[in-house]
Image (tube, grey):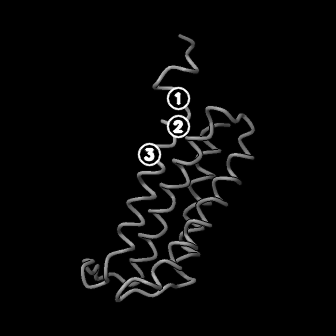
Amino acid sequence: MPARTHLLNAQWLRWLPAVLWASLIFWASSRPASLIPLIPVPHADKGIHFLEFAVLCYLICWAQQLTERRFKMILWLAILMTSTYGAFDEYHQRFTPERTPEVADWLADTLGAVAAGLLWLRLRM
């Protein structure tokens, strides 16, 4: 069996970590604020947004690299996908009890995506 069709190299399987991580983000943002532990550090939520979406962007880059060799194209597509998911996540919080969407959270999501994408690209060059 050719290596490209082997189960461990299957393109859909490489997307599984990103899909699971995005699902975890969705689950976490679906919880009312009263169920989320408070971190007594100013703007800690922005750091959490940054890290959550940095991981997502890195996983999206990793998923694409099996079939796409233009690394800069992977980078920009992953950042766009992650930032868009962050915007939808903020919009989704509008319908979650005790939660409100914030542009600053979306910016933290996008900055996390950019940082992780650039790290991924740096490791490939």
Label 2 with label 1: CB-CB less than 8 Å: yes
- Secondary element at tag 2: helix
The location of residue 48, given as percent across then percent down, is: 41, 69
Is the residue 53 above or below the residue 11 in the image? below
Foreground disc of the pair 3, 2: 2
Distance Cα–Cα, label 1 vs label 3:
13 Å
Q: Amino acid at mark 3?
A: Pro
Distance Cα–Cα, label 2 vs label 1:
6 Å
Mark number displayed over residue 99: none
Foreground disc of the pair 1, 3: 1
Disc 3 crowd, CA 10 A, few/some/many (<14, 14-19, 20+): some
Circle 2 sits on which residue? 12
Q: How many marks?
A: 3
Please report whichever mark, 1 or 3, sits nearer to the chain's N-terminal start. Answer: 1
Of 81 and 117, the residue lying toward us: 81
Is the residue 80 above or below the residue 9 in the image? below
Label 1 with label 3: CB-CB less than 8 Å: no
Circle 3 sits on which residue? 17
Q: Is residue 85 left or right of residue 94?
A: right
Please report whichever mark, 3 or 2, sits nearer to the chain's N-terminal start. Answer: 2
Disc 1 crowd, CA 10 A, few/some/many (<14, 14-19, 20+): some
Residue at 50% across / 55% down in the picture?
56
Mark number displayed over residue 10: 1
Distance Cα–Cα, label 3 vs label 2:
10 Å
Is the residue 32 above or below the residue 108 in the image? below
The location of residue 122, given as percent across then percent down, is: 64, 44
Q: Amino acid at mark 1?
A: Ala
Q: Amino acid at mark 2?
A: Trp
Furthest residue to the top?
1
